[in-house]
Amino acid sequence: MLDIKFIRENIEAVKQDLNKRQDSEKLEWLDDLLSKDEEYRKALGESEKLRASRNQITAEINKLRKDGKDFSKKVKEAKELPEKIKKAEENIDELRKLINHYQMRLPNILHESVPYGKDGSENVVVREVGEKKEFDFELRNHGELIESLGLANFEDASRLCGTGFYYLLGDMALLEMALQRFAVETLVKKGFIVVEPPFMLKRKPYEGVTDLADFETMMYKIDGEDLFLIATSEHPIGAMLMNKVLEEKDMPLKYCGVSACFRKEIGSHGIDEKGLFRVHQFNKIEQFIFCKPEDSWKYHEELIANAEEIFKKLKLPYRVINICTGDIGIVAAKKYDIETWMPREKEYKEVVSCSNCTGYQAVRLNIKYRKGSEKEYIHTLNSTAVATGRALRAIIENYQQKDGSIKVPTVLQAYVGKKVIGK
């Protein structure tokens, strides 16, 4: 979230940003946030005065008693103070909750390079990479193909779990693990530390890393417990340093998250009944960086370059998209997507999301670093390296052979132990 001090000192910038996002609702209550903040600071001052009065009256009573004088009037004053202090604290708590409610819903300040747009149709293509292969035969649906080859079982997964789940079998399971291993080794060579995080997270740290709306639209809650299944390893990795102060010499911290991800997608809208692309459970290799504020834009470009390197080596055609103001969400200050070419449908599909969240998550999580004698909020960045289900679909379509088999991308052949699967 935005630091309240930043909001106070940069109110016009906050308003301009909300106008860019076409967010009139938050513009309407922004003045109330500032009013409540002023009231809160005033209430804090009054509370401090009451506490000081209590100490002063106690000292006066002791002196009057020592001097043998009447102190009954002061005792009466002293008895009234606890109730006044209690009411003052209750008022402060209510104001703090309301201010926090507003802050948690205000979006991050967008970078100047984020294009203006009303929705995803106005996202901007930054570059297209790779050659789109022409096929002289009709491509089969990826789910139907791998099921017919005995490499996946959607029917039993649906029967036992519902739609949006699958069993991967044999060489397809090996190919999925090969993607994970290839992505991890690529990032380790670049200095990333591998993290296998918990697959569950409490609500408090979870609120530090994501839009509150995600609790309704994305996350699975564990019944009867304060635990949510993670939607991406970005979330537990970001929360890992909650309430900590880092040393400047130790930054940047670069992590490679390896995890299953769980997303409920309310109403199962768009969930694959027989496919790997949009599902409730999938594996993903994630990039995450904690860094100094002045370095975050450099690392944002580094993260997207790392993801691009993986898709270049897989020889999958793709394009990089700069996400516009109407499609970016509240946490990121700028976001790139990578979309891979799906030749059967002759369209691009999202496979990577790469965000610079600047200090937004750090303020929520209270993560700072020591800069000389001062402490400042760090910046956080995240990017998909590879979401294996989506990458598998792209491989199955782009590497499908006329006889129904699937060629294994060259960079993955050593992991799989085969050049072709499904024969």
Image (cartoon, rainbow, N blue to C red):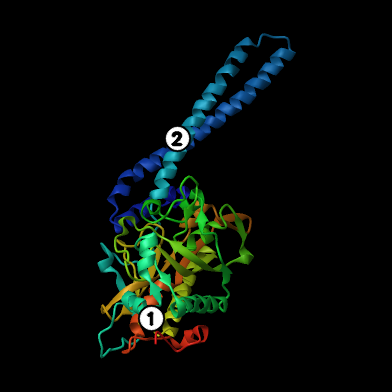
As rendered, which of 349 and 153 lies closer to the eye?
153
- Label 2: state its secondary structure: helix
Total marks drawn?
Answer: 2
The answer to whether residue 204 is above or below residue 307 is above
Q: Is residue 62 visible?
A: yes
Q: Residues within 10 Å of mark 1 (few under 14, many from 20)?
A: many
Q: Position of residue 54 (x, y in %)?
A: 61, 24
Q: Residue at point 42% right, 83% down?
A: 312
- The residue to which callout 2 is attached is 94
Residue type, label 2: Glu
Image quarter where the C terminus lies is bottom left
Q: Earlier in the sequence, mark 2 or mark 1?
A: 2
Q: Position of residue 393 (x, y in %)?
A: 36, 76
The answer to whether residue 281 is above or below residue 93 is below
- The residue to which callout 1 is attached is 395
State left or right for residue 151 relative to residue 52: left
- Label 1: state its secondary structure: helix
